[in-house]
Image: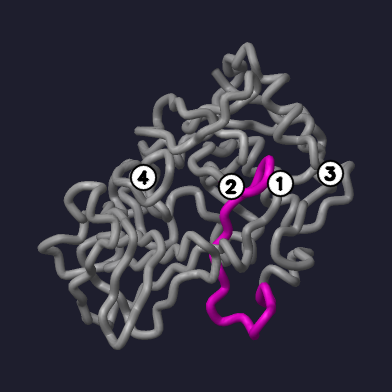
Amino acid sequence: MSQPSDTGSVTTPFAETSPWRQPIGPNPSIDPNSAAMIEYVASEHAMYANLMEFGIPIFSEPRDTRVHDVDCVKLDWGICPFNGKPVFIPQGAEPNSGSDGALVTLHEPSGTIYEFWQAEEDGGQWSASWGAVNSLHGSGWGGSATGAGASRLAGVIRIGEIAAGHIPHALALQTNNACPTFRPPALKSDGTSLREDCIPHGARLQLDPALDLSALGLTPGELAVAIAMQRYGGYVMDVGGAPLSVSFELDTHAAPDSIGVTYEAAGFRGDYDAMENIPWELLRVLK
């Protein structure tokens, strides 16, 4: 039986009260250092779309019940979050090709999210450097699958959302200028930047809601992202290789070396599309 939308589902994860599902109210307070932080993140006039190499593969097969014992490689990090748990990994699941080796699997009957960092499979035995176990019906925060302690599923732009032209949640953002500090709802930080314009994990960025998007000639994909950034914004939740990037679901059915037909139809030109028609200099950091 499917869960009511307010308790989280495979297509709309997390409780309705989750920070990821909360729109930004009118007249929010602005961080006093917002201008400096945005000057840096918008310096390349881009918010790069992580569509392939660092796209997030999400696997959910309600009729598949296979489970695995998963070992953690980082033995000095504490107790492996998968210890003693039968971890659901459906047949055909694979991590992305990026250095993070990210993988998300969903066990629908229990509402459980298994999140892997640097996942590997060898002869049927799975391992990961680290990961987390979260609930589809929870807050979207918990564990160490991401630098800020956000669920690896949280904020990811889904293929179906691009097809529908509607993204009903805040976005998962990365920057190479993340501070070693954090603010709620983040739980921690793996940032290392000591610049005065660094951005804490958990900071929420918003595109100026007064901006008339209809006058910019945006592609359908850019428009969906821009509207979401005006209504919900995005949380800085990981360190990335660029001033600013955003997580998308990896199209696991796409042809080799292709981003997939849905993304192509929405106007994305390839991995790391800059979405440069959106005036990213009009972002602001909320207090």
Which tag is nearer the camera, tag 1 or tag 3?
Answer: 1
Which tag is nearer the camera, tag 2 or tag 1?
Answer: 2
Circles 2 and 1 in contact, beta carbons < 8 Å: no
- For the point 71% across and 46% down, the residue is 47
- Residue 174 pos. (x, y %): 57, 44
**Main secondary-structure element of the magenta-colored stretch:** loop
> Is 162 positioned to the left or the right of 4 in the image?
right
> Is 6 positioned to the left or the right of 155 in the image?
left
Find the distance from the CA under tag 4 to the CA under tag 2: 20 Å
Disc 2: which residue: 240
Find the distance from the CA under tag 4 to the CA under tag 1: 23 Å
- Residue 144 pos. (x, y %): 33, 47
Q: Does the magenta run of residues contain 148?
A: no
Decide which of tag 2 and tag 3 comes sooner along the chain: 3
- For the point 74% across and 65% down, the residue is 266
Q: Does the magenta run of residues contain 242?
A: yes
Disc 4: which residue: 140
Amino acid at the residue labelled 3:
Ser
**What secondary structure is found at the residue carrying circle 2?**
loop
**What secondary structure is found at the residue carrying circle 1?**
loop
Task: Tell me, for residue 47, which label it has, or none.
Answer: 1
Disc 3: which residue: 214
Magenta highlight range: 240-261
**What secondary structure is found at the residue carrying circle 3?**
helix
Circles 3 and 4 in contact, beta carbons < 8 Å: no
Which tag is nearer the camera, tag 2 or tag 3?
Answer: 2
**What secondary structure is found at the residue carrying circle 4?**
loop
Query: Depth check: 159 or 46 in front?
Result: 46
Asked whether the viewer can see residue 209, the reply is: no
